[in-house]
Image (cartoon, helix red, strand yellow):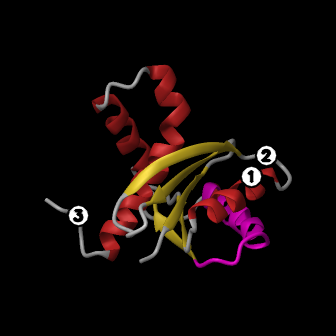
Amino acid sequence: MTRYLALDVGDERIGVALSDASGWLARPLETIPRVAGSASYERLCEIIATHGVDAIVVGLPLLPGGGQGKQVDSTHAYVRGLKMHVDLPIHYWDERGSTQRAQEIQIANRRSRRRQRRRIDAVAAAVILQDFLDHQTGGACE
């Protein structure tokens, strides 16, 4: 099976999520700062090596109507830099609504507002990854 790493790339932070070894279930992993230089890429390389990641899923922040705005350009720029550090397949996945769904999940799990802010990007990455995984396997369980 394939183990996936998902990224929710923002201007200041990158949410990171990981699938289980069977490629069925996503879980939030961590949030890393997006800073100039190679620090975030190096951290992702450590995660990839530690967890035996086979492929990467990157949330694509499309506009509500499906068009591409400047945040898509920023995400593509980050991925261009990432490709200089990793040699894995990279899949883009429509992330519209992922942050809202991540907030709903955290509220349902009764996370404090402070803890929600710390984990929202990683939870959003897990939402993106779970959508991707469900699509790969023919849909979510009902």
Q: Position of residue 30 (x, y in %)?
A: 57, 44
Question: 121 left or right of 85?
Answer: left
What residue is shown with label 1? 40
Measuring 66% from the left and 44% from the top, which residue is drawn there? 32
Measuring 33% from the left and 29% from the top, which residue is drawn there? 107
Residue contact at pointers 1 and 2, CB within 8 angstroms: yes
Residue 96 seen anywhere in this rendered image of the structure: no
What residue is shown with label 2? 35
Pick the front one: 47 or 116: 47
Residue contact at pointers 2 and 3, CB within 8 angstroms: no
Q: Which residues are magenta?
A: 71-89
User: What is the three-letter code of the residue carrying label 3?
Assistant: Ala
What residue is shown with label 3? 140
Q: Position of residue 7 (x, y in %)?
A: 56, 57
User: What is the three-letter code of the residue carrying label 1?
Assistant: Ser
Pick the front one: 118 or 99: 118
First in sequence: mark 2 or mark 3?
Answer: 2
Report the residue that reaches farthest toward the left. 142
55 vs 42: above or below? below
Measuring 55% from the left and 31% from the top, which residue is drawn there? 118
125 vs 22: above or below? above
Q: CA distance from mark 1 to mark 2?
A: 7 Å
**The magenta stretch spans residue 84:** yes
